[in-house]
Image (cartoon, helix red, strand yellow):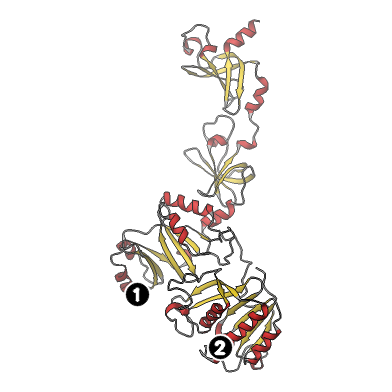
Amino acid sequence: MTVPPFVHRITTYDPADRDEHGSYVGAEDTISDHGPVEAAYLQAIAAFAEDTGVDCLHIREPGVAGVPHFGLEPVIDGQGLAGLFPPDLSGFHDGAEVPLSVGLELVRAMLRDNGAWCSLEAEGKFIVHVGWDQYVYVTSEDPCERALARTRALGLFPERLETSPYDADFDEPGEQRPADEVFWARLRWSIAMRQAALLEEGYLYNASRWHRLTGDNLDAVRTRLTPRAQLTVWPDLSTDVDAVLATLPDEGLVELVWEDEDGLITSTIADESEYPELTAQVAGARAAAALSMSVDERHPLFTAVLPDSDGVLRARWRTDPTPSDRNWAFLKTLRRGEICSGTVTEIAGFGVTFVDIGGFTAMINIPELSWRRINHPADIVSVGQRISAEILDVDLVRERVSLSLKALQQDPMRQLLQQVGQITNGVVTKLVPFGAFVRIEDREDGLEGLVHLAELAEEQGERPQDVIQVGDTLAVKIVDVDPQRRRITLSHLQALALGES
């Protein structure tokens, strides 16, 4: 976002009544008079909008009063938005466009501290924000000399500032995860795996809707979400409501979420003094969950913010990143075919090797450790060993990274291609009904090929054990090498024939 260069603070407070530190020492009217001063503020903002050529505004970072409310005036029904938006506040969301007349009424509601707030912007041209104690900040792309004169004539004091204290901060570390197709695929997979089933839709600051998800209703829920909403994914509610209530903490705030008999999901924040009333509210609920309000004890599965319909994430608010969100941010930097380094952290009993690659645990399946046959991963790697490997696959949905150690090694079978047609001696390692396997390299993990029964014995009907035994040395001709299918074809009879000739 490009911030316009001209910033003015508009107040009823005379700059002459400020001390040498800039603090105001005169009489203060910290709440709206609901009368001529309030009207003057609105006329001044309208004058700035006219000078800038703005006739509509976008709502940014909207919110409603939480509990407790710290404003100087009491919250009223409808958060001061009655008559501007429907009771469910549809249309009051980040990015919503409103005419200037509605924007001015929003400013009135904020001056009156009725419960709702937001920034009002025309991208790169005009910004209005109502601060504490009747301070209004107007940022514009033009000096707006006529508007400044009009503001003074209205009895207000415009002061030029370098920046507004409400300028959006774009320098927060990390990257906000968008609710893109990868997010929805992961959510669907998590539902299928019974890891997740509850979606919290933060459509305003301090206001959420809850959705209990299934594989069947996920798409329908998705279409109903408020534009640019913050999304938080949680495990499912528990059907043992009594057990949930029994786990409420002895002190401190807790958020209780419950689903009633009609399927309506409600949440409320309460402390221990409110538990009796809360228990009565939850009576008869189908399912419930108690979520700690402590950041250290509040553990959603993953989060995101809805992008616009063109896929661009324009909402500026952020969710608190979960471990899954941090995994996403890391995994999206990886590419198939890249080489990465890591430390072996575990060799599992089922043969998978786990490797720490920058805080994320990737895995190497046993076939990817070596081109040669191995009995156990410990034949190749050890816990604590630093290794380099090639990235085979990055699965953002399941949060898995597959590595290959052998991809950085030379395939000995491809070297063997140069020996097709040659005769060599090998050791019989295994007899099978259709032939014998022969190791043709002089090493314990040497490559093995198959001598088919027809290429092993001249007499039809003979069994491999009638001709040779494990451990015998056998002359064979290398007939074919197929690196793709990992097959080597050998012939004893052809080796004998070439030897006799």
Q: Which three-letter amino acid code belongs to the residue tagged 2?
A: Ala
Most extreme residue toward the left is: 284
Q: Classify mark 1: helix, strand or loop.
A: helix
Pointer 1: residues within 10 angstroms few (<14), some, or many (20+)? few
316 or 154, nearer to the observer? 154
Total marks shown come to: 2
Closest to the camera, between mark 1 and mark 2, is 2
Q: Quick check: can you spot residue 169? A: yes
Q: Which three-letter amino acid code belongs to the residue tagged 1?
A: Glu
Q: Quadrant of residue 267?
A: bottom left
Point out which mark residue 384 bears: none
Residue that appears at 42% across and 49% down = 192
Residue that appears at 28% across and 65% down = 284
Q: Quick check: can you spot residue 300? A: no
Pointer 2: residues within 10 angstroms few (<14), some, or many (20+)? some
Dot placed on the residue nearer the N-terminal end, 1 or 2: 2
Q: Quadrant of residue 421?
A: top right
Q: Quadrant of the C terminus?
A: top right
Q: Quadrant of residue 169?
A: bottom right
109 or 199, nearer to the observer? 109
Point out which mark residue 274 bears: 1
Q: Is residue 70 above or below residue 88?
A: below
Horizontal and vertical percent for residue 213? 41, 56
Q: Is residue 210 above or below residue 103?
A: above
Horizontal and vertical percent for residue 32? 52, 88
Horizontal and vertical percent for residue 399? 52, 49
Q: Which residue is mark 2?
A: 39
User: Cα distance, mark 1 to mark 2?
Assistant: 41 Å
Question: Would residue 93 appear left or right of 51 to someone viewing this image?
Answer: left
Q: Quadrant of the N terminus?
A: bottom right
Horizontal and vertical percent for residue 165? 62, 77
